Amino acid sequence: EKGGYPTFMEKEIEEQPRAVADTLLGRTDAEGNLSLDELRIPEEKLRAVERVTIVACGTAAYAGTVAKYAIEHWTRIPVEVALAHEFRYSDPIVDERTLVVSISQSGETMDTLMAVKHARDLGALTVSVCNTLGSTIPRESDAALYTHAGPEIAVASTKAFLAQIAACYLLGLYLAQLRGGAYAEDPQAVMKELHDVPDKIAEVLRRMDRVKEIARFMADTRAVLFLGRNVGFPVALEGALKLKELAYIHAEGFAAGELKHGPIALIEPGQPVFIVVPGPDTPHELHRKVVSNIQEIRARGARTIVIAQDGDTDVEPYADEVIRVPHTMPLLQPLLTVVPLQVFALHLSTAKGLDVDQPRNLAKSVTVE
Ligand code: M6R
């Protein structure tokens, strides 16, 4: 059932182009407009939404953080991401004009379920982004937007994460389309670009030999840091989480701009740091700013492993390793840049002789609070 792969996780990583393609499938009409009729929420209700709150845990919450940047940019609706287990006890500001989007692979995570129930009690409109048909969270929600990643068996979430991000993009673009007006970006143009992403994920997967080698050399590493900015920030957090759960290595993800506010004190000679570099076409000069972060930590002896877009030569003088991903528009980059981090964690875990599919102390779905 592992389809010839040694582990479920390897199979699921390889299935990612498909998971994203299937999640996008059939969600646009002949003119290229988004049609999410399956939501079965009257359009006027969605048009009236004044704020979005995303509730989720773990990797799903990082998908939600990517979604926050995208949905806010495309719709100008304020989006908040709450860890589901914190949401209920934080006296959340939620009413009928709040769209509460839960994200859950299993659809059975108790923390997330309880957050959804609480949001419903407060009168919010609830949408479940979920990978498991007929599971509890979509049943308890007003509407469901299913990811079509297929069953995910490995405890560490990979293909579900990419599918969750893709589904959230669809939701954001759909809200933008419904609200009309001047778009920051034309939803149809974004959709076109999004449809090219699965092939680009496949391309990233074809380039993973060096990442696997780096992972093998690093089997004795005690700590790894991950830096990213904007949508690269949740990618950094996800890279760190993968490494914790799979390789039991202390790992931290930071927003690159935070470095000088504390974390740079951690940098000592030989400290491995992954840096997720925004594409050179990212607004607000974020690319240049992250490149200068790489320079700063390199000057303090860090071993810099840089994830950069094809053709980005600016990173080269400061990178001990460069892992290349194809070009896509800045907000869509997480679908490409997270893949090397997943492969790295998997191969480091394997190099340490650990159980990749079933890490210690963890369960695939956390059905207790
Ligand atoms: O099934 P869910 O998406 O609700 O699960 C949420 C988290 O428990 C899950 O993403 C967890 O963080 C994974 N083990 C991460 O790899």
Image (cartoon, rainbow, N blue to C red):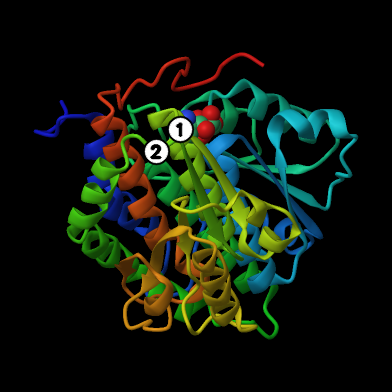
Query: Where residue 167 sits in the image (x, y, percent)?
Result: 49, 54
Residue 40 appears in the rendering: no
Residue neighbourhood size for the residue with mark 1, other residues' Cα within 10 Å, grouped as few (<14), some (14–19), many (≥20): many
* 225 horizontally vs 84: left or right: left
Residue 137 in the image: above or below residue 306:
above
* 293 horizontally vs 243: left or right: right
Residue 86 appears in the rendering: yes
The reply to whether discs 2 and 1 touch (Cβ–Cβ < 8 Å) is yes
User: Looking at the image, is mark 2 or mark 1 nearer the viewer?
Assistant: 2
- SS for tag 1? loop
> Residue drawn at (49%, 66%), measured in percent from left and top?
298
- Residue for badge 2: 221
Viewer-side residue, 27 vs 261: 261
> Residue drawn at (31%, 36%), measured in percent from left and top?
219
**Residue type (three-letter) at the residue carrying disc 1:** Ile
Q: CA distance from mark 2 to mark 1?
A: 8 Å
**Residue 300, labelled with which disc?**
none
Counting every numbered tag in the picture gives 2
Query: Where residue 26 sits in the image (x, y, percent)?
Result: 36, 59
**Residue type (three-letter) at the residue carrying disc 2:** Thr
Which comes before the other along the chain, label 2 or label 1?
2
**Residue 249, labelled with which disc?**
1
> Residue drawn at (63%, 72%), measured in percent from left and top?
74
> Residue drawn at (67%, 78%), measured in percent from left and top?
180
Query: Where residue 105 sits in the image (x, y, percent)?
Result: 47, 35
